Image (cartoon, grey):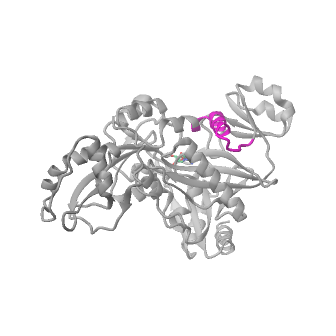
Amino acid sequence: MPPPITDPLQYINRTTIQPRPQSVAFSYLLTHERICAELAKVNKPLINISLSTTCKTTILQLVKPAISVVNKINPLLNLFCFAGGGAELYLFSLMIINDIHIGVLGGGQLGGMLIRHAIDFGIYIKILDSSPEATCARYTNNFVLGDTLDYDAVMAFGKGLDIITIEKEAVNVDALEELAKQGVQVHPSPAVIRIVQDKYSQKDFLLQNNIPVSPGILIKDKKELNKYKDRLPAVLKLCRDGYDGKGVMMLKTEADFDKAFDAPCVLEDLVAIRKELAVIVSRNAQGEIKCYDPVEMVFNKQLNLLDYQLAPAEITDRNAAQAKDLAIRTAEALSLVGIMAVEMFLTIDDEILVNELAPRPHNSGHHTIEACVTSQYEQLLRAIMGMPPGDTTAHKKSVMINILEPAEGNKGQLDRTFKAVLDTKDAHLHWYGKKNSREGRKVGHITVNGDSISEAVSKAEAIRNHAK
Ligand code: AIR
């Protein structure tokens, strides 16, 4: 099993060396001193080769000892030796990323968009999903049919992969722990997934790390819930397996208790919210962290689903800085490797509370594909491969609207939406290709860019009005 990658590669300076003959996308320069120090630790001499030795196999043979040393630091880096001018010797580590095999648990739309970005890096992507009609099934012939919650299915899927990541939280963590023991890099770590899979352990973890959250208590079942009728109004959230509005309900009157979930839940006080925000943060094994600007989510209260999202959020600079700071502190507390959406409430008292965590690509990062320099998917790939984070600057303001499966008899709405998007400048359609969808299911999204939020909003509203 390779050691955990704890040794920061901060001594690696990114450099712009000419592309090498073999297909290599990234190059790093390790400082001479650092390589000497690493080799000295294992009593290996520094190899000297001359610039004229251009044959790759000869060079690789010569640097084998160094390769093993550096691979201990980061097993995904391959070392390449290169002699600079005169007697000066440098070692370049070359990341042969087109030999990396990444497995993704879950094959829905988020996995689909991840594949799209993995193509840019030449990475092999393998997908595990239990539905033959999952979005990803059509994008890779490395699609494995199986349940991400099943121990044996995840074990069989993960063997031989370099890295495993997730695009949903409903995964078998015991299997991921075992795979990590066997040397597969699992990002985010099984420990992080375990914490996040349960809404109460998530809240508890945040509290232990002094990150403000909305107050809530753990409820075992419906019987216990009935003791808390004095806490109305409140929000009841299933501890496990809730997403996209499922597993969350409002308790406004005593009558609502009859409909309550009969399973472990978190009972949360209803916070007076001014805005709902989300920040996507990435962190690599070297500890390099980067955030996107906070986005603002406007919810459809009836469906308890996101109605549309504004990027950036229309909040003060101070609030934006606070939100980013909370996201960074959370990622650090979790020692996250990967990306994570941190959903937050901005309260009417100007406080920011963390609501929920999702250590994977997220709906609140859809806009990063067309509105930011680096998409959340590329950022995830960079983070889990130990590369430096990409630029998170937004070059456009944007509005993102989820497309939900319309009611039977109203399917024409989709055609009108498509047409309106395709007719609008800097509006982008994402259609997930889901089959047999139930009403209200996320089946696509639209990102509309503008030079200002108001321009993006008016274009988005025009698309909506057309679609009606
Ligand atoms: N997803 C994961 N957690 C929350 C969401 N929305 C994405 C993932 C997953 C897909 O939604 O991409 O695979 C499942 O979509 P559905 O419509 O089958 O529930």
In the image: residue 246, left or right of residue 84: right
Task: Give the extent of the magenta segment.
Answer: 196-214
In the image: residue 223, left or right of residue 20: right
Q: Position of residue 316 (x, y in %)?
A: 72, 64
Tell me if residue 213 is in the magenta stretch. Answer: yes
Is residue 314 among the parts visible in the rendering?
no
Q: Quadrant of the C terminus?
A: bottom right
Q: Residue furthest top?
A: 223
Q: Position of residue 10 (x, y in %)?
A: 42, 54
Is residue 336 among the parts visible in the rendering?
yes
Say which residue appears at 33% left-offset and 41% top-offset: 161
- In the rendered view, tell whether residue 250 sits above or below residue 228: below
State which quadrant residue 50 falls in: bottom left
Q: Quadrant of the N terminus?
A: top left
Q: Position of residue 344 (x, y in %)?
A: 68, 50
Q: Main secondary structure of the magenta part?
A: helix
Q: Nearer the viewer, residue 217 or 401?
A: 217
Q: Position of residue 331 (x, y in %)?
A: 56, 47
Tag count in the figure? 0
Tell me if residue 93 is in the magenta stretch. Answer: no
Q: Nearer the viewer, residue 430 or 390?
A: 390
In the image: residue 76, left or right of residue 398: left
- In the rendered view, tell whether residue 281 sits above or below residue 460: above
State which quadrant residue 42 falls in: top left
